[in-house]
């Protein structure tokens, strides 16, 4: 220690020949460096980034790397600017490794993202920075003058914490005629000095002897230490105590209880009296050994005074001295061997945990690294680690005591959001000791789920005439993900309704999924709206799903019935004039009121009732058909002109209604009808006489044309019958003189001449004869009643067709006279007796 102040210069010289190198051993894939001790803080150890092939920019961007030391003191750090491993503290080999021949510090470099562990080792090179030293500078040794030559006296050994050539190598003693020095190697490999008496002592000649004991090493330069030994020659007692064993050996378990007896040393003295009393004591043993064991001076029993630790000290060598009352003494050795006991529980040190773990993490990804240490030896220090089998993870052993937790199965946060992975470490002792640690792993959500609607499809009913902004329904979608990935927003898909954009009819609230009507719907315009609502989450990239929404508009009774026939009269005009023969029987059809309702369902069900009549009880109206029929036969006292007011009601709540006014003329002929209408027109103020005359002329011309047409038809039938007498039997019939009472159901002269314009085509072949009426006189109403009688199975046939605004039908001619019933215009019924013209069956069409 005398030359310790100059060690810095020698360290620098040692650094010249012990260059810091990085040895990359591919066999184990670990770093190996060497470093002289006593280097200052921040000294370069090795270029880790270069040796591992790490790119510093990428390493810094992905979380960097971290250095772990196996000891409690962190000696190294990794500089992320240059990738160099440097010393964090001054390294003293003697403090770290004591007398161990090879002193190495292990370290681990943990690289993050992806997590990977590299192992390294730094060998601490010893420098001769310690001199051999003795516990005391001066010691005293008492020897009787009767001690026989050849007797050996153990001396206190020197200590040198250095190793190798730098450690203690030899002892030297100053010259003496009575003593010589002998150096022996102990069982623990340490050199022990012993003083040998080579010549009998004579107290009277020389009472004291002074010797200098020097210990040296072989370092460069050589260092040494010395102590002074004073030998005092005692008079009188001629027999020294003698131990029963020159060396005592014992083996104890490290878990032996404090206060337990280890062994007992025994020495005898052949003297008698006080000179035979022997006292025992430890002779110059290290201070730490003196605290571990206690020697009873009287009995020689050695006891344990503190807990033994196999991992710290496996072997004890103690020098025991027996001394009698006369001052004579003898020495013996006690060798105590400590055996390992499984008394240390494995220690689990979590180095790094990668949490949270994304649920799309690939298989085999390292998510945690931990180290297991057991201070026991042999099988007691061999540790096995395990985790539960039902978890989606597995253990992989990286190095001797390092383990990695890696993913073994795909993770799904929607199934398990958190894992508590219990790592269990058990040693190989009997019984085995074990410990555990819990790794709390949270699974990080990834947007791997699209929103799911609560229903496969949605439908709602909305009453028409709704208020703008009315809530229609609310769609709900949930996302099994978490956080922003589970935040669902709604929007409408593109579409059009009646040519207008869908967004002008309805809207959806983005956050709640509430669907609102932006305008008032009209059932008569839009009865159903089909649309798609899209739910989209907030992930990146976003996921979405669609659902169909059907919006049904519910009808309300907001439309009153509309009367199609009779049409409303303009001013004092004649609208809805019908002819009823005074000879009509009860139940005869007079007219038909035709009405429609733009609503639907119950709101469009119409009922008819007679609200007002000139002659009550003469006519009645069908409740559902709207047919006006005679309730009784007309009487002579009944007025020729009857006015009827028919009320048409729907079945809505509240019910809406409309009125229709009919004028029924009781007359037996068309001439009488025209006269009645003419007189009525003349009586009406404000109607010009010329206009009435024109109408009468038109009416007479129309009747004349119709009469001539029937004559032509009759002539054609006669010719055909003559030519094809074998097909048609002879018969006769005349159209001439048809009474006006047969024209029941014709809607008056005005309707007959104006509303029911028609064309009649007759040919020699009755199967091709046609009656064509204009489409303007047709309307949608109930079908006409079938004929009251049928004349047997007559081979007839016909068909009705609608084309280009006209409704046409074909009929057959038969020899006999039959009734002709047709309903080409659903608004009225024509019943004409035409000699031999008979259709096969009534036909009713709805336009």
Image (cartoon, helix red, strand yellow):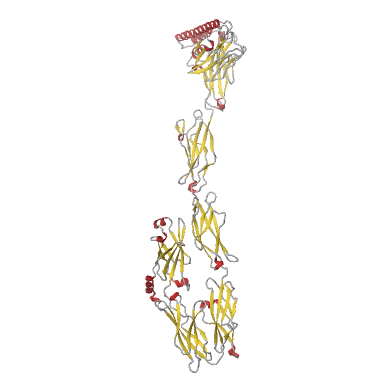
Report x, y in % for residue 272. 60, 90
The structure residue drawn at horizontal position 60% and vertical position 66%, both measured from the top left corner, is 430
Report x, y in % for residue 754. 49, 13
Q: Is 634 in front, or is 461?
A: 461
The structure residue drawn at horizontal position 52% and vertical position 72%, both measured from the top left corner, is 312
In this orientation, does residue 393 appear?
A: yes
Q: Is 646 in front, or is 103?
A: 103
Tell which residue pokes out farthest to the bottom in this image. Answer: 204
User: Is 228 placed above or below 493 here?
Assistant: below
Report x, y in % for residue 49. 40, 60
Q: Quadrant of the N terminus?
A: bottom left
The structure residue drawn at horizontal position 57% and vertical position 68%, both measured from the top left corner, is 343
In which quarter of the view is residue 333 placed? Answer: bottom right
User: Is 525 placed above or below 594 here?
Assistant: below
User: Is 465 placed above or below 271 here?
Assistant: above
In this orientation, does residue 306 appear?
A: no
Tell which residue pokes out farthest to the front in this image. Answer: 27
In which quarter of the view is residue 843 placed? Answer: top right
User: Is 127 placed above or below 741 here?
Assistant: below
Report x, y in % for residue 172. 45, 83
Q: Is 374 in front, or is 755?
A: 374
Q: How many marks?
A: 0
């Amino acid at each position: 220690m005398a030359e310790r102040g100059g060690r810095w210069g020698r360290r620098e010289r040692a650094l010249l020949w012990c260059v810091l190198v990085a040895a990359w051993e591919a066999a184990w894939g670990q770093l190996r460096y060497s470093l002289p001790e006593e280097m200052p803080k921040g000294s370069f150890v090795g270029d880790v980034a270069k040796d591992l092939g790490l790119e510093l920019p990428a390493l810094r961007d992905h979380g960097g790397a971290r250095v772990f030391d196996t000891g409690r003191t962190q000696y190294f750090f990794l500089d992320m600017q240059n990738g160099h491993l440097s010393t964090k503290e001054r390294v003293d080999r003697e403090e770290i490794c004591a007398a161990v021949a090879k002193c190495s510090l292990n370290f681990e470099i943990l690289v993050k993202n992806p997590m990977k562990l590299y192992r390294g080792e730094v060998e601490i090179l010893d420098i001769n920075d310690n001199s051999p030293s003795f516990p005391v500078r001066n010691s005293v040794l008492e020897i009787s003058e009767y001690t026989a030559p050849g007797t050996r006296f153990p001396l206190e050994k020197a200590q040198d914490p250095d190793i190798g050539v730098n450690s203690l190598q030899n002892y030297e003693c100053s010259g003496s005629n009575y003593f010589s020095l002998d150096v022996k190697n102990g069982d623990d490999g340490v050199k022990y000095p012993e003083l040998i008496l080579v010549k009998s002592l004579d107290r009277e000649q020389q009472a004291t002897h002074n010797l200098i004991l020097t210990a040296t090493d072989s370092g460069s330069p050589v260092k040494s230490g010395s102590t002074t030994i004073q030998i005092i020659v005692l008079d009188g007692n001629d027999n020294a105590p003698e131990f029963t064993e020159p060396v005592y050996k014992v083996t104890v378990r490290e878990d032996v209880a404090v206060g337990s007896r280890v062994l007992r040393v025994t020495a005898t003295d052949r003297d008698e009296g006080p000179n035979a009393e022997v006292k025992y004591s430890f002779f110059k043993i290290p201070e730490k050994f003196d605290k571990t064991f206690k020697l009873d001076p009287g009995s020689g029993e050695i006891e344990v005074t503190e807990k033994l630790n196999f991992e710290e000290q496996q072997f004890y060598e103690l020098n025991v001295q027996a001394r009698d009352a006369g001052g004579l003494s003898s020495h013996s050795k006690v060798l105590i061997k400590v055996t390992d006991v499984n008394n240390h529980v494995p220690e689990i040190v979590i180095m790094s945990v990668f949490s949270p773990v994304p649920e799309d993490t690939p298989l085999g990804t390292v998510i945690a690294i931990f180290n297991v240490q057991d201070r026991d030896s042999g099988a007691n220090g061999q540790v096995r680690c395990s985790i539960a089998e039902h978890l989606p993870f597995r253990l992989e052993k990286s190095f001797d005591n390092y383990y990695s937790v890696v993913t073994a199965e795909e993770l799904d946060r929607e199934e398990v959001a958190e894992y508590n992975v219990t790592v269990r470490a058990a040693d190989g002792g009997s019984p085995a000791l074990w410990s555990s640690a819990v790794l709390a792993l949270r699974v990080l959500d990834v947007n791997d789920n699209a929103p799911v609607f609560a229903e496969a499809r949605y439908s709602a009913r909305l009453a028409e005439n709704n208020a703008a902004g009315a809530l229609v329904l609310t769609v709900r979608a949930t996302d099994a993900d978490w956080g922003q990935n589970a935040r669902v927003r709604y929007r409408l898909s593109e579409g059009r309704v009646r040519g207008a954009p869908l967004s002008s009819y309805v809207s959806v609230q983005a956050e709640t999924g509430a669907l609102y009507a932006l305008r008032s719907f009209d059932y008569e315009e839009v009865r159903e709206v089909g649309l798609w609502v899209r739910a989209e989450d907030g992930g990146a990239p976003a996921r979405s799903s669609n659902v169909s929404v059907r919006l049904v508009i519910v009808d309300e009774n907001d439309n009153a019935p509309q009367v199609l026939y009779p049409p409303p009269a303009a001013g004092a005009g004649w609208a809805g004039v019908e002819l009823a023969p005074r000879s009509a029987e009860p139940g005869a059809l007079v007219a038909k009121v035709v009405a429609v309702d733009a609503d639907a369902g119950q709101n469009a069900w119409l009922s008819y009732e007679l609200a007002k009549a000139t002659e009550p009880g003469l006519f009645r109206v069908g409740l559902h058909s709207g047919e006006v029929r005679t309730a009784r036969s007309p009487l002579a006292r009944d007025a020729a002109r009857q006015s009827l007011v028919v009320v048409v009601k729907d079945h809505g709540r509240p019910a809406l209604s409309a009125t229709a006014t009919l004028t029924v003329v009781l007359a037996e002929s068309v001439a009488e009808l025209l006269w009645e209408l003419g007189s009525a027109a003349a009586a009406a103020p404000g109607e010009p006489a010329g206009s009435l005359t024109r109408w009468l002329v038109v009416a007479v011309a129309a009747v004349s044309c119709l009469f001539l047409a029937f004559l032509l038809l009759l002539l054609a039938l006669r010719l055909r019958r003559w030519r094809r007498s074998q097909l048609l039997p002879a018969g006769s019939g005349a159209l001439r003189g048809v009474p006006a009472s047969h024209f029941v159901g014709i809607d008056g002269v005005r309707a007959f001449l104006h509303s029911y314009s028609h064309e009649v085509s007759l040919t020699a072949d009755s199967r091709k004869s046609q009656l064509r009426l204009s489409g303007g006189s047709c309307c949608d109403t109930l079908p006409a009643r079938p004929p009251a009688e049928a004349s047997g199975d007559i081979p007839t046939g016909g068909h009705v067709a609608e084309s280009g605004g006209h409704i046409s039908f074909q009929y057959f001619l038969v020899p006999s006279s039959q009734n002709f019933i047709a309903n080409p215009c659903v608004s009225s019924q024509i019943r004409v007796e035409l000699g031999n013209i008979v259709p096969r069956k009534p036909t009713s069409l709805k336009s």
